[in-house]
Amino acid sequence: MRLSQHFGRTLRDAPSDAQMTSHKLIVRAGLARPLAAGIWSLLPLGWRVFRKLEAIIREEMDAIGVEEMLMPVLHPAELWQTSGRWESVDVLMKLQNREGRPFVLAPTCEEVVTDLCRQEVESYKDLPRYVYHIQTKERDELRARGGMIRLREFTMKDAYSMNANTAGLDVFYEAIYQAYLNIFERCGIDIIPVEADTGTMGGSASHEFVMAHDEGEDRFVRCADCGYAANVEAAAFIRRDARNGDPAPLEKVATPDCKTIAELCNFLSIPPEQTLKAVFYTTNDGDLVLAMLRGDLDVNEVKLMSKLGASTLEPATEEQIAAVGAAAGYASPIGIDVRKEGGADGLLVIVDPSLESMSNFVTGANEAGYHVVNANYPRDFEVTRIADIAEPYDGATCEACGGTLHIESATELGHCFKLGTRYSKPFGATYVDENGQEQYVIMGSYGIGLDRLMAAVIEAHHDDYGILWPREVAPYDIHIVAITKDDTLYEVADQLYADLRAAGFDVVYDDRGLSPGVMFNDADLIGVPLRVTVSTRSLEQGGIEIKWRHEKERQILPLEGAVEQIASLLETGQAG
Amino acid sequence: MRLSQHFGRTLRDAPSDAQMTSHKLIVRAGLARPLAAGIWSLLPLGWRVFRKLEAIIREEMDAIGVEEMLMPVLHPAELWQTSGRWESVDVLMKLQNREGRPFVLAPTCEEVVTDLCRQEVESYKDLPRYVYHIQTKERDELRARGGMIRLREFTMKDAYSMNANTAGLDVFYEAIYQAYLNIFERCGIDIIPVEADTGTMGGSASHEFVMAHDEGEDRFVRCADCGYAANVEAAAFIRRDARNGDPAPLEKVATPDCKTIAELCNFLSIPPEQTLKAVFYTTNDGDLVLAMLRGDLDVNEVKLMSKLGASTLEPATEEQIAAVGAAAGYASPIGIDVRKEGGADGLLVIVDPSLESMSNFVTGANEAGYHVVNANYPRDFEVTRIADIAEPYDGATCEACGGTLHIESATELGHCFKLGTRYSKPFGATYVDENGQEQYVIMGSYGIGLDRLMAAVIEAHHDDYGILWPREVAPYDIHIVAITKDDTLYEVADQLYADLRAAGFDVVYDDRGLSPGVMFNDADLIGVPLRVTVSTRSLEQGGIEIKWRHEKERQILPLEGAVEQIASLLETGQAG
């Protein structure tokens, strides 16, 4: 492409609202333009990067036998009502057609693929089946963010697996896990697969593929010793022992104005780990929940929602708390009618396993101004369920090896889910097995967002002057700059442009006749791996000047044989 | 792809609601499945056809210097309010985000590209620019139709041109017109470019690319002599002379119960061409319009809307007609306050040029039960404007050559528009010319729907047994069928499958071990150009059996050198 005919210009200044480097460079290099908050047009340069990302993804999906297809953006509401996600997914963009029929814009396609599965799959002979598509997605996010990091409209590759049993799913999961590692490696991203929560997607297991990234909005823990990695919503860690001697008699004490753990600890002169913290929530179903954990820990609400199967949590009001006989700020399960696991009556009390590391602790007396000391479980109260609901913290102990966990910021670039029968059950997607028995299809779901991936590549590959594209995702392989006051020099550059394209390279050619400084700055900004300059000076020095974007050195190649030499340089991977 | 692992099955029966051949075959061959009325999922087989169509389109766009990009599906309402199409386009799917901000789902992208144009183009040096994208479109059609012919969600290639002047637009228009001819030819479609109305798209000229098609819902006229072709909404034709002698004195006659032309002609014993017909409409702006034309002709409402700049027309009520002093069934401009061209007062009277072929005609007296005879224009009344508003008819006379026009049914597959300043004006998309003057960018718009194109290829290429894909759009080049009771024969077929793929061909391999009849029927249904059968019988006969989908003859090739022979057959274009 000749820059003199190219749509989309470079900009000297980044938009004033841009915080992230990728946001600034995407706009400045002319890769994309915002149309609205979280909705962008990809200009031709950005689209070329997309096509490279698509090609990598297609190759890796093809290599493990996943077929490409295309599912629609507009989904009838019934499908999402069948799965229950019409209510539980809060980023759904809902709309009606002219007849008033409700639709949803696809944020993901589990419902559609499961609906297809029940049409196309009848027998065990029709399994396994693996499909993917690269499609526009819409999510009505509360906030768009970071340029192209969190979008409201974006392009996602989503793949789906259909197996006869979990053993088949496990084998495919490993294959696509490796394909994901390949994809990110080819994009030049240092990826970390982390164990993740399944969230509103459902299913039995999931991994996020994250890039460590100071500006990322996700957080994960990593063990420096054994390499265990999980996002904070799924991370396991050891609750160190905080026992306080053998059980002593329970005692009620006056603790005026001690509604917080800090006030309580200060008043009683005890450390937080000798207290049991109480937090009340109401779920989207209107259920009141008492979540409890050791006073030095905090509730991770995503963990809690996942354990409850809830999609939202709100803090409970004092009235709701009082209605079950508890006292806000002085609460505990003591003296409360606690629900049995599987039961329907009484208060749902879910407690972190840190409870089991404690003795003779302090907790609420369910009377304003009073706590109890020397509380012990299960001597003094019941709970509905013990489950991990605690936020991991920097320095926590690794459950796998006893090493130290550290918390890092990250940006999530991919996500794999073992869905199991989460969707095949409500949709009745079954097959007849070898014994003539009807069984549910075992499914999985696997996504990568292309826009965010492009932004992540830039976050990982830039300097003060612009982008440094890894070779496989660069919009072009070679950037020719023609510097001439004498138009005859264009003949040399034109010929080189034609010859390099004929040799199979993607070439951008700056034939705009601007000042060398402007053209070199644009070349650095756009970040094509190899720059080739044709100028009076280079010709005087014996030919054309070549320079890698990631190196300072320049080098002169004779015109004769230049195409072959450039080809050889690019093929041998000197492009960094 | 091995059919044993392929997602999407063939069906013996077509859906009961399918009328069109392409609808039936798309479903039966497993190319696509409906998700809702007018919304389809492309199964892997259909998607492969799409990828071939995309490749052809990309090559032809690239060859004329059009850059690919990607514009969003979700557009802020403001853009469509700026162009005025928020109101005038009735297929818009409108929705709101969580903040209540209104959006539109893209039915086309003139607004977005013009908004980008005003950001990226500043000077004449930034022109011309040509871009396209292949993107999901949404149109809330009154009725989906014909399987994948008229969809509510579909994929469209839409290209846009930005030029400094109309001369530049004209040159590009010719280039893309030729590119469109190439695209349809490569898809095996016998395309007819016809002059078309610009409709709600606006602009100065447009062409539709149609396929003659008995089941098509469009109609166009074509001159058997000179080749002139235009859709019925744009077709010009000669109003043959219907003069009835020199002007005689105007006379009012009683014509009781003659509210229709037929009743009037019968009562007065005159032919319809001696009458001037009157039809009243109200436009979307609430304007009353009197449309008139020779009694043997009919109003083409699209022509009329185009001449009025209206987006809808409704028949006027008797009250509305009476309010301007006219009498329904007995109307004419006689005695009415007629609006002057460019004026605002009086009745808007628009008359077909057939008026100028008449003398001494009969028209309404604006009094119930009375007409006038020997009416003559302009002696007896005024009109606001004379413009072509008549429906062409089979047998009409060609304006270009005097030959005979015939009306044919067709399906529209592409549309090109010279937009001029239709969008650049309201958006303020200007550039500074060589003289420092600000000028509006001159634009054009060019679309092809991929889903409909796929259906059209099937309409044009099928027989009683299934599809016959033209080579360039076939989902696969070669369809291997392995017939064996002895599994060792799979070794031969597997090797052939591997070798043909290694030679660069797209190969589908029926390794399902079903009965020969079932597998051959599926091969005919799916319609891959070349079928290769490996069977005990073929091996006994000396090798593998090959058969073109479009021929009856089968032929045995020795296994030795089979790949080279098949390659040679496919390369020399014997694939029909």
Image (cartoon, coloured by chain):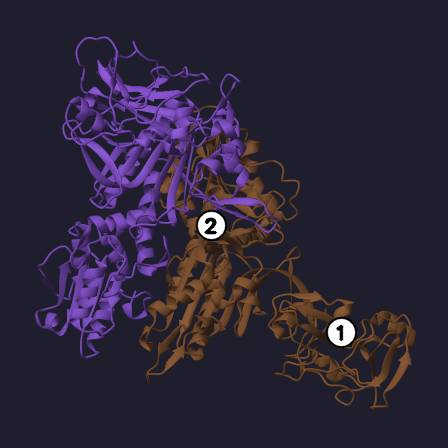
Chain colours: A brown, B purple
The residue lying at 22 percent from left, 62 percent from top is B479
| Residue B35 placement: quadrant | bottom left
Q: Amino acid at mark 1?
A: Ala
Who is closer to the viewer here, A352 or B371?
Answer: B371
Where residue B540 appears, as percent x and y from the top left, is 9, 73
Label 2 CA crowd tier, 10 Å (few <14, some 14–19, many 20+): many
Tell me which corner region of the image, top left, top right, bottom left or bottom right, holds residue A562: top left
Callout 2: residue from which chain? Answer: A
Q: Residue at x 27, y 55 (%)?
A: B23
Query: Can you identify the residue that label 1 sits on?
Result: A323
Vertical arrangement, residue B257 with respect to residue A458, above or below: above
Determine the secondary structure under disc 2. Answer: helix
In space, the residues marked 2 and 1 are separated at their CA atoms by: 56 Å
* Element at label 1: helix
Whether B341 is drawn above or below A493: the answer is above
Same-chain check, marks 2 and 1 = yes
Q: Is residue B358 visible?
A: yes
Locate residue B345, reporting x and y percent.
46, 17
Nearer the observer, A458 or A570 = A458
Q: Which residue is nearer to you in this view: A520 or A143?
A: A143
Q: Amino acid at mark 2?
A: Phe
Q: Chain of mark 1?
A: A
Viewer can see residue B401 = no
Which mark, by number, is residue A50?
2
